[in-house]
Amino acid sequence: MNRKVIIVSNRLPVTIKKEGDSLNSYPSTGGLATGLSSVYKQGNNLWIGWPGVSEIEEVEKKDVIKSLRKDNMAPIFLSQQDIEDFYEGFSNGTIWPLYHYFPEFAHYDQVLWEAYKKVNQQFCDEILQHASPEDIIWVHDYQLLLLPKMLRDKLPNATIGFFQHIPFPSYEIFRLFPWRLEILEGMLGADLIGFHTYDDMRHFLSSVNRIVGIGNTMGQLRLHDRLIAVDSFPMGIDYEKFENAPKTKETKERLKDYKRIFEGQKVVLSIDRLDYSKGIKQRLNAFDLFLDKYPEYVGKVSLLLIVVPSRDKVYQYQQLKEEIDTLVGRLDGKYSKIGWTPIHYFYRSFSFHDLSAMYSEAEVALITPLRDGMNLICKEYIASKNNKKGVLILSEMAGAAKELSEAIIINPNDEDKLVEAMHQALTMTEEEQIARNTEMQSKLKRYNIYRWVEVFMQQLEEIKEKQKKLNMRVITDSNINKMMAQYEEAKRAILFLDYDGTLKPFVKNPQDAYPDPELHQLIEKLSKNKKIRLVIISGRDRQTLDGWLGKYNLDIIAEHGVWLRENIDGKPTWRMIDDLDQGWKEKIYSILELYVDRTPGAFIEDKDYSLVWHYRKADIEFGELRARELSSNISYLISNMNLQIMDGNKVLEIKNRDVNKGKAARKFLAQEDYEFILAVGDDLTDEDTFEAMPEEAFTFKVGLTTSAARFNIRSAEQVRRMLEKFIE
């Protein structure tokens, strides 16, 4: 099998520039391009993205395609309007500020949203020109959040990974997004969704739970019939590249100039792209406070401030640039002396060797973003310290802070603490610096960019393997045909069918789950089949089940096995399977009432011999939290009582321990010899039924979950289609 890996990102790892009459290519030096070079340059693998040029002729496009194909790349050509609406407009004008906790800067424009969808579809169409169903497709970052689902719809069996390189906001921020559901559904088209930190992963799972209505188990969730993994993968750097750079001739030349300019001074290095999320203004204010509080450092410490130009056509960025310029000018005017200025300010980018020289010689690195997905600059600084001397001051809001705990970790909004962090850094002993940096270097060297790629790809393969194992249990047409052949040969058959989630999908209000016309017709036909004994086995109360299905010639097991209705010669009779005490209910009911009062949307269902606490209408995460708390409290209370707690689909049910569906089902099996037995259910309570069935029975669990049942069936809709076979 000729399986290939396709990397997809907004930008290719090269930039094509039109210079005069010629098109020239310039490679990217970013960490992602470096790490993924070990993937996309192999065999038939491919990297698809925008090459950075928009206004070129059709004949030039052909030349670009041909040139890039030699290096395993394929371009997406975007118009200038696409760049303005999709990239600058929606990606950076809506998603970026919202995801970085600056909702006041986000603007919600339907035209820009349509442009975002259009370009994501354009990426999908281009990928489909190259991809096969068995390929691995790895999509990157916030510009392509809709792409995984678009690909899944066209290539349902493909292996699709998605990684987000910027933060994912908390639910309270994300819910502001008008197109929040579409964004989440787009991302959920992937098999593996990766973030830099556990916090981002947690925020994403919370939003999926609250907006899509899907919970997770240890970072894995099930969407329809597919298992999806969500995990954190802190991105590394090319450690050896930065470790070796100070030893090169080019960097040594830059070091000579560096040492001459900053002779006799200590340098605090600050490098950032122009962005309101980087905390540059706060940094300058803190440096002002530092020189004011510790005047002995005036003339002895300089701030080397490098701001890389970015999105300077956007109003917020223009305004930020003006504010930075003003602050720098004010501080230089306030503190400058002949032969010394407090701030060396550069509004431009620098070469790799220039940066290497700055990293290796700066006594302090001040990396204090207000919010950042990872931030690789701090890692590059530590890796460049061959002598292990130097101090990193790092914002706790950067993803890297979770790994680099030996740095001085600060809140970037606390300017007083930032001042003290600079003082601590400048007075730290060499022994402590070496000890801290040795530990950080060890981490960065072990988990570098190549290891990051390797771990993500391994996890992607593992989740696909889990999917395959679950899908192997899913009933196939072949299995159904064999089952029906056995049914045809049988003289007598019994069917145990759960109701909610099995014959009828779950609904928000349990009383709205009454049988629809199709289900009535299906039940009627099955109940009239003289070969079949039909048993509805449910946790619902007997009054509801009798009202919905009592007119049919069938048997009913209600309240998980408390009540049994047998239809003998057309005469339905209800009886209790066992004589049960319900004296416990009053005490438990008062506790459930307390949790109803504390949980908006929760309510109690009082059955004959059980109590049910429903939280389907409550806020999902709050309901789950209250359910765990309630379960813990009641478990302690009933420890010496013959009761048990059943955890169902957004319900907790307290009932007698001696009652379960399996025990009730066995009573039916003992009455008569059945040559064909079928049992279908969807939740934990149905496991008792499956375990009570003889080995040759056909048992089905609805949904892709592990079970005692022999087979899985995907949905209530497919259960109905299977039952129609018995009518045919």
Image (cartoon, rainbow, N blue to C red):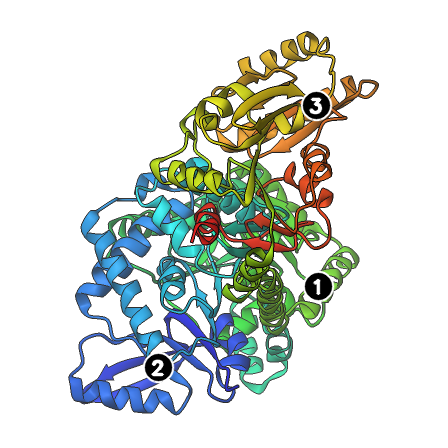
Q: Position of residue 270 (x, y in %)?
A: 50, 57
Residue located at (41% from left, 33% from top):
515
Q: Quadrant of residue 595?
A: top right
Using the numbered discs, state the Cα–Cα distance from disc 2 to disc 1 in whole angstroms. 35 Å
Numbered disc 2: secondary structure: strand
- Above or below 56: residue 95: above
Question: Are the two marked residues, 2 and 3, in contact with CB atoms closer than 8 angstroms?
Answer: no
* Residue corresponding to mark 1: 443
Numbered disc 3: secondary structure: loop
Q: Which of label 2 and label 3 is nearer to you?
A: 3
- Above or below 716: residue 121: below
Q: Position of residue 714 (x, y in %)?
A: 50, 53
Q: Quadrant of residue 347?
A: bottom left
* Residue corresponding to mark 3: 577
Using the numbered discs, state the Cα–Cα distance from disc 2 to disc 3 in whole angstroms. 69 Å
* Residue corresponding to mark 2: 74
